[in-house]
């Protein structure tokens, strides 16, 4: 199954998330099969990261977005478990600082883009400026409506600079989100992750859905595609994300560089 094509939001297509099944598992009908394939992908990603670093001509930027409890942290923990931490940086975008608010909204983002040879992961991202900013009316529509164009231009700049961008929307149902919140609430090892704001944000589910549909429709491009990943089943979420990352890294024609000198003439006597 080509997950890249199955879950990619086609450029210019209007997205309706209600028509995307958050419980879809494509051809992976059994959890045991999915976990086995995930393990294979994790190993392959470790090898591909090593090659990405050695090649030095490309970088990979992974963007993760989704409703609260969609599994952004879990995706990072499981999918990227085999990569070398020295070559992979995770950045979570929280509420902007006072200094950041004095800059354009992409200023803090650009500073965290991975350099060539590296993998960067954004846990939430520059898309918050067309999501929470829109839903919470933090700025006027005249301001946030221009950000789609700014984001596309920014991502085109990165693409032209050999930063390959893969953006994943972790698609869960409202019912599944409630189940996950209740499990956290009843688990003393996880209830620290809950916040009163989780309940408040949940009330805005429809508004966030509308904002996500607009963002994914307007900003899925050939050079920075969005993927809608069914995420009610965590094992399949991890499988699909890992498979898409693997497929795209393998398409880059990565290769080990040729030595700049005759290594056979190095003496270790």
Image (cartoon, rainbow, N blue to C red):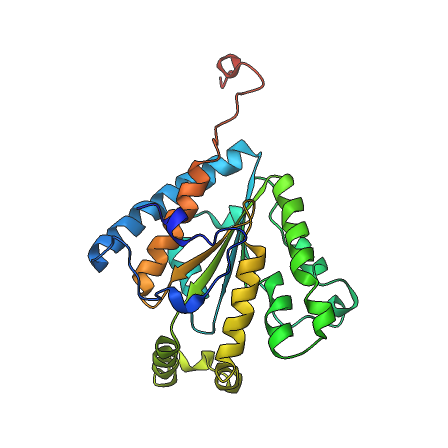
Viewer can see residue 130: yes
Image position of 169 (left or right of 155): left
- Compared to residue 97, the image places residue 269 above or below, namely above
In the rendered image, which quarter is residue 108 located in?
A: bottom right
On screen, 56 above or below 201?
Answer: above
Q: Percent position (x, y) of residue 221?
A: 56, 49
The one of 47 and 27 positioned closer to us in this rendering: 27
Q: Which residue does the image show at 26% across and 54% down from the upper left?
A: 34
Which residue is at 52% across, 33% downward?
54
Residue at (25, 54) in percent of width and height: 28
- Seen in the picture, residue 105 relative to 113 is either above or below; the reply is below
Q: Position of residue 12 (x, y in %)?
A: 54, 53
Task: Give the number of marks.
Answer: 0
**Farthest residue toward the right?**
102
Residue displayed at 48% across by 79% down: 205
At which x and y percent is residue 242? 38, 51
The answer to whether residue 71 of the structure is visible from this angle is: no
Q: Position of residue 265 (x, y in %)?
A: 52, 12
């Amino acid at each position: 199954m080509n997950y890249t094509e199955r879950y990619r939001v086609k450029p210019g297509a209007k997205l309706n998330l209600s028509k995307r099944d958050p419980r879809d598992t494509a051809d992976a009908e059994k959890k045991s099969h999915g976990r086995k394939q995930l393990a294979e992908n994790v190993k392959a990603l470790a090898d591909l990261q090593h090659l990405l670093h050695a090649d030095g001509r490309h970088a990979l930027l992974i963007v993760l977005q989704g409703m609260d409890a969609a599994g952004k942290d879990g995706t990072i923990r499981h999918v990227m478990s085999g990569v070398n931490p020295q070559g992979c940086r995770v950045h979570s975008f929280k509420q902007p600082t006072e200094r950041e608010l004095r800059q354009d909204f992409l200023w803090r983002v650009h500073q965290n883009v991975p350099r060539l040879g590296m993998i960067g992961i954004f846990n939430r991202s520059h898309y918050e400026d067309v999501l929470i900013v829109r839903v919470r009316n933090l700025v006027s529509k005249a301001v946030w409506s221009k950000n789609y164009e700014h984001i596309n231009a920014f991502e085109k700049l990165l693409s032209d600079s050999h930063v390959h961008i893969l953006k994943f929307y972790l698609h869960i149902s409202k019912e599944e989100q409630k189940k996950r919140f209740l499990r956290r609430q009843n688990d003393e090892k996880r209830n620290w992750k809950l916040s009163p704001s989780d309940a408040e944000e949940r009330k805005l589910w429809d508004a966030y859905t509308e904002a996500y549909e607009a963002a994914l429709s307007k900003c899925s491009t050939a050079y920075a595609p969005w993927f809608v990943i069914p995420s009610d089943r965590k094992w399949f979420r991890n499988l699909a994300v890992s498979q898409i990352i693997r497929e795209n890294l393998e398409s880059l024609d990565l290769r080990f560089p040729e030595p700049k000198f005759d290594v056979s003439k190095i003496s270790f006597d």
